[in-house]
Image (tube, grey):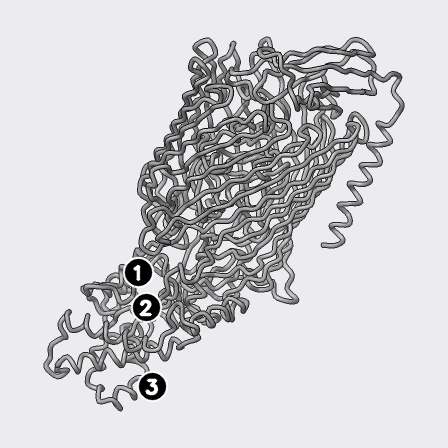
């Protein structure tokens, strides 16, 4: 990796020298322009107006008095572009070598659909004429969002799905197959992929820019691999920070809030304070050198996981309660066993005889029993915090090229729901980027380094605390023995020929648990806290601590030939990426001597041309990507946009693909309920997972049948088992997406309408498949009085419970593909925005998504998306010169959530967000009072996630350049 990094810097620096030499010639003439920019209505000067030479990187901004001075190494004519958020962009032709006292009056803009976007085609274009669906938040939308922070406000955009694992950890998705760790979606911050290398998905805004430093957010739902490569499968989010050349001066922000209002059982009973503050400073010198620094910190008590739903409900049988309960947010109860297996243990038989209980042995039931667990609140670190530091240095080599270095650092504590609940304690992630860019090209190299800090698995912590107090063999042995003793004490006669009553068995289970739990470490006691600290301080598999410092290195570039070719617009680009996995055996099998790296290369070309008097624009692109573990993938895209006045109709055919994630390829982790293993052949062979293996779906049916009263060897029970002898070889997943859309300005440009319909076809759908192995063969449906039935009596009951001891697991979950069927989904989105009189704005959007195909019970159906979702917004950022407000209503229908952690239903959600802002013009500040989930309607966005309530806040933002 050191050699790779060194080569990246050598390439970048070499190109820097080439660009400098090729563009540093002395120009024949220097042009100087100076003047003042004012607001047309009030005649007041405008501070911070961005002024650039069209087609170049050179530019300046107006100072505190609205004045500007610009020197350009170019003879006239040239075009200056004056732009500022909230005002109509102006272009002014300069025809003289020296222009002074140029007066520019900018009109405040209330017209819809005037935004310029880059992400849809990787070149600037009008949002109305984008070839695909796209949404954008500008500085004003970010500042005025009713949500408690701008990143949560992204949920109000058309087509967006948001899932929260924590108060500071949100995941963005689009068009179905949502998850708490979305590997189908790409998020870029200033061109840098924000994924954590070991996880392969974006980590929300934990290392992104603060609200003070965000210039815009662009969101594209749907397949984008043709331009952005692997994993831009369901969509892409671009967060663009502010340039220190264009946004100078000092700005600061502070927010005070409260959450946990009217806490429910298992939550704080009193409101809890929240804090967030940030500061930004940027300065430019002679339009040649500029820098910026940012710092941000937030702290809050996290949302709690309080769901007591029993995931092991199949084990209950006729009992009034479930001795084998496995509750969602209780950890340690994942460890379970069929106590009936103790009948076959010679040691247990001897103990029963010694205690005069030998005659009761046949009445030890085939009942799944779980160990007593600990509620999540005693195991997870809920002290959420997030420190973000950012710095950038920019140098304009000449009028055509700019070199910059950027550092983004994020650290803190959060909670993430994956295959288990992970407490991300004191983690950090840092990115370094060196970029050379001009008006028609860029070359960037960056590295992402993560450090798991003190992060640990909450589930495993509960399991290990129990085990440090009393191991499983002893606990289940005591349970079984005390169960038999309770039958005897209850007056049951083992020789009567009958069976114990349900009431007697229920009492025996309660007595057995109480006896086996005698002396158990209880939360809050010194013994419990000492055991918890010991488990959290020891790395997996001996403890629950991660030890991960994985990295990702990236080199990419793009060149736009539009200025060099007359008959069409053409862009080309390429990328090279290396994952360097360094979990030290706590996530992957990357133990000492077994280094794991993954290399990927990619290249694309895109061409576009206008026809029919420039009314029709056709665009085609093709990309090729290769991951070293899989075959190369071609991703074509073709689109057409027809424009007539302010109406735009678009058609597109897009393709995308996603490589199996780093975990999908190489994970090797015991998650208590199973061992997760990568889908590469090495791991399937390592654990021999297909010998005497049965699908977990059929095993669950078998468990339910036994729980319903059938004997474990009853052919009606064993006949439910389905043997698994192989699974398809893991490969990339592919999608074809057909989209039609319409976007237009109507009603004298006061009504913006945007409609899109998509139809997706997935091939080689990546999913997970779980199997459970028996120690020997099981013959489904064999009669008990046969030789096969006798073998079943030994092996079949072992399938009733997972073995959780590392190295001895009997349950495996691996990554594979659905290769014998296409998976299809479709959906639509409609957005309306209407500019009312006096600057009031009413908007709304409706989103529909539906999975058409039936994936089947053997695979995770992780569509995880509400079929119906609606957002309605109403606001006015200038009710008066000082007062503004915004209100948002959100609704989503109930839906089914399936993941490796838990499966269940997510109820429908109704929430209101609102804010009122007041401008303190003399102080160059804005005070904002607001509430998120204003009426405190408790909800969760994913099954197994935390319960979310209201947040009420007040904030003040100071900006030196505030007009």
Quadrant, the N terminus: bottom right
Callout 3–callout 2 Cβ contact below 8 Å: no
Give the CA separation, mark 2 to mark 1: 9 Å
- Residue at 70% x, 36% y: name it: 557
Circle 1 SS class: loop
Give the CA separation, mark 1 to mark 3: 28 Å
Give the CA separation, mark 3 to mark 2: 21 Å
Residue 288's spot in the image, x, y percent?
79, 30
Reading the image, the residue beneath label 3 is 347
**Residue neighbourhood size for the residue with mark 3, other residues' Cα within 10 Å, grouped as few (<14), some (14–19), many (≥20):** few
* The quadrant where residue 524 appears: bottom left
Callout 2–callout 1 Cβ contact below 8 Å: yes
**Residue neighbourhood size for the residue with mark 2, other residues' Cα within 10 Å, grouped as few (<14), some (14–19), many (≥20):** many
- Residue at 56% x, 56% y: name it: 426
Residue farthest toward the front in the current orientation of the protein: 922
871 displayed left or right of 548 = left
Circle 3 SS class: helix
Where residue 97 is drawn, which disc sits there?
none
Mark 3 / mark 2, whichever is N-terminal:
3
- Eye-nearest disc, 3 or 2: 2
Reading the image, the residue beneath label 1 is 312
Quadrant, the C terminus: top right
Residue 599's spot in the image, x, y percent?
65, 49
Q: Name above or below for residue 83 compared with residue 624.
A: above
Where residue 370 is drawn, which disc sits there?
2
Mark 2 / mark 1, whichever is N-terminal:
1
697 displayed left or right of 928 = left
- Residue at 46% x, 26% y: name it: 739
């Amino acid at each position: 990796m050191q050699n790779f990094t060194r080569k990246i810097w050598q390439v970048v620096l070499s190109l820097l020298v080439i660009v400098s030499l090729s563009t540093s010639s002395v120009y024949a003439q220097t042009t100087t322009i100076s003047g003042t920019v004012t607001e047309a209505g009030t005649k007041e000067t405008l501070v911070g107006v961005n002024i650039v030479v069209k087609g170049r990187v050179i530019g300046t901004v107006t100072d505190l008095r609205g004045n500007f001075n610009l020197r350009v190494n170019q003879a006239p004519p040239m075009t200056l572009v004056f732009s500022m958020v909230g005002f109509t962009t102006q272009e002014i032709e300069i025809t003289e070598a020296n222009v002074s006292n140029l007066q520019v009056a900018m009109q405040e803009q209330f017209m819809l659909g005037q935004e310029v976007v880059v992400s849809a085609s990787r070149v600037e274009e009008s949002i109305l004429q984008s070839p695909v669906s796209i949404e954008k938040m500008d500085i004003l939308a970010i500042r005025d969002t009713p949500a408690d922070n701008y990143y949560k406000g992204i949920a109000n955009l058309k087509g967006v799905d948001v899932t929260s694992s924590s108060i500071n950890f949100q995941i963005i998705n689009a068009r179905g197959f949502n998850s708490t760790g979305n590997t189908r979606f790409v998020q870029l911050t200033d061109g840098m992929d924000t994924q954590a290398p070991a996880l392969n998905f974006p980590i929300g805004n934990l290392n992104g820019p603060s609200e003070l430093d965000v210039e815009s957010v662009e969101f594209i739902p749907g397949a984008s691999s043709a331009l952005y490569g692997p994993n831009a499968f369901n969509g892409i989010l671009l967060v663009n920070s502010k340039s220190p050349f264009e946004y100078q001066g000092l700005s600061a922000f502070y927010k005070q809030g409260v959450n946990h209002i009217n806490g429910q059982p298992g939550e704080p009973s009193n409101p809890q304070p929240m804090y967030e503050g940030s500061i930004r400073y940027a300065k430019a010198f002679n339009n040649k050198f500029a820098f910026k620094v940012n710092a941000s910190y937030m702290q809050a008590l996290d949302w709690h996981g309080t769901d007591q739903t029993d995931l092991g409900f199949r084990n209950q049988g006729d009992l009034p309660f479930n001795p084998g309960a496995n509750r969602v947010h209780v950890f340690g109860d994942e460890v379970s066993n069929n106590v009936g297996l103790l009948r076959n243990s010679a040691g247990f038989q001897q103990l029963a005889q010694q205690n005069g209980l030998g005659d009761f042995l046949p009445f030890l039931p085939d009942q799944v029993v779980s160990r007593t667990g600990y509620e999540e609140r005693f195991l997870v670190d809920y002290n959420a915090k997030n420190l973000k530091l950012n710095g950038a240095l920019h140098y304009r080599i000449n009028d055509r090229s700019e070199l910059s270095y950027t550092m983004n650092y994020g650290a803190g504590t959060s909670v993430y729901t994956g295959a288990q609940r992970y407490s991300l304690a004191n983690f950090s992630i840092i990115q370094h980027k060196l970029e050379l860019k001009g008006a028609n090209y860029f070359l960037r190299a960056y590295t992402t380094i993560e450090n798991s800090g003190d992060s640990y698995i909450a589930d495993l912590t509960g399991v290990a605390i129990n085990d440090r107090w009393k191991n499983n063999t002893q606990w289940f042995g005591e349970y079984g023995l005390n169960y038999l003793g309770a039958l005897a004490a209850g007056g049951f006669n083992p020789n009567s020929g009958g069976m114990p009553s349900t009431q007697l068995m229920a009492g025996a289970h309660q007595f057995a648990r109480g006896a086996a739990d005698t002396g158990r470490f209880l939360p809050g006691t010194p013994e419990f806290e000492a055991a918890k600290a010991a488990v959290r301080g020891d790395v997996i598999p001996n403890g629950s601590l991660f030890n991960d410092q994985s990295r990702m290195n990236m080199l990419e570039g793009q060149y736009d030939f539009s200025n060099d070719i007359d008959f069409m617009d053409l862009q080309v680009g390429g990328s090279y990426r290396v994952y360097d996995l360094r979990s030290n055996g706590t996530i992957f099998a990357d133990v000492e001597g077994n280094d794991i790296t993954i290399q990927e290369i990619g290249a694309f070309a895109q061409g576009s041309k206008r026809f029919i008097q420039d009314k029709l624009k056709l665009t085609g692109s093709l990309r090729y990507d290769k991951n070293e573990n899989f075959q190369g993938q071609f991703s074509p895209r073709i689109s057409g946009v027809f424009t007539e006045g302010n109406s735009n109709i678009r058609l597109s055919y897009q393709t995308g693909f996603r490589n199996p994630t780093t975990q999908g390829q190489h994970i090797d982790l015991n998650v208590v309920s199973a061992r997760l293993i990568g889908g590469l052949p090495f791991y399937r062979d390592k654990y021999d997972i297909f010998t005497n293996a049965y699908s977990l779906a059929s095993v669950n049916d078998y468990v339910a049948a036994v729980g319903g009263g059938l004997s474990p060897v009853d052919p009606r029970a064993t006949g439910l088992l389905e043997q698994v002898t192989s699974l398809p070889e893991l490969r990339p997943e592919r999608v074809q997406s057909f989209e039609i859309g319409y976007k237009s300005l109507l009603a004298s440009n006061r009504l913006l309408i945007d409609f899109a319909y998509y139809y997706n076809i997935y091939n080689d759908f990546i999913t997970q498949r779980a199997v459970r192995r028996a120690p020997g063969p099981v013959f489904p449906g064999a009669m008990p009085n046969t030789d096969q039935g006798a073998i079943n009596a030994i092996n079949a009951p072992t399938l009733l419970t997972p073995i959780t001891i590392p190295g001895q697991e009997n349950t495996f979950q691996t990554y594979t593909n659905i290769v014998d069927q296409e998976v299809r989904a479709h959906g639509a989105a409609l957005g309306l925005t209407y500019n009312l009189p006096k600057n009031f704005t009413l908007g709304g959007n409706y989103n529909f998504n539906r999975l058409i195909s039936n994936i089947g019970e053997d695979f995770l159906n992780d569509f995880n998306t509400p079929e119906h979702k609606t957002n309605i917004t109403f606001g006015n950022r200038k009710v008066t010169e000082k007062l503004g407000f915004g209100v948002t209503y959100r609704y989503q229908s109930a839906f089914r959530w399936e993941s490796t952690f838990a499966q269940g239903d997510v109820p429908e959600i109704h929430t209101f967000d609102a804010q009122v802002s007041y401008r303190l013009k003399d102080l160059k500040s804005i005070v904002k009072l607001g509430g998120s989930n204003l009426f405190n309607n408790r909800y969760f966005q994913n099954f197994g996630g935390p319960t979310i309530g209201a947040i009420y806040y007040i904030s003040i933002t100071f900006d030196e350049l505030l007009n």
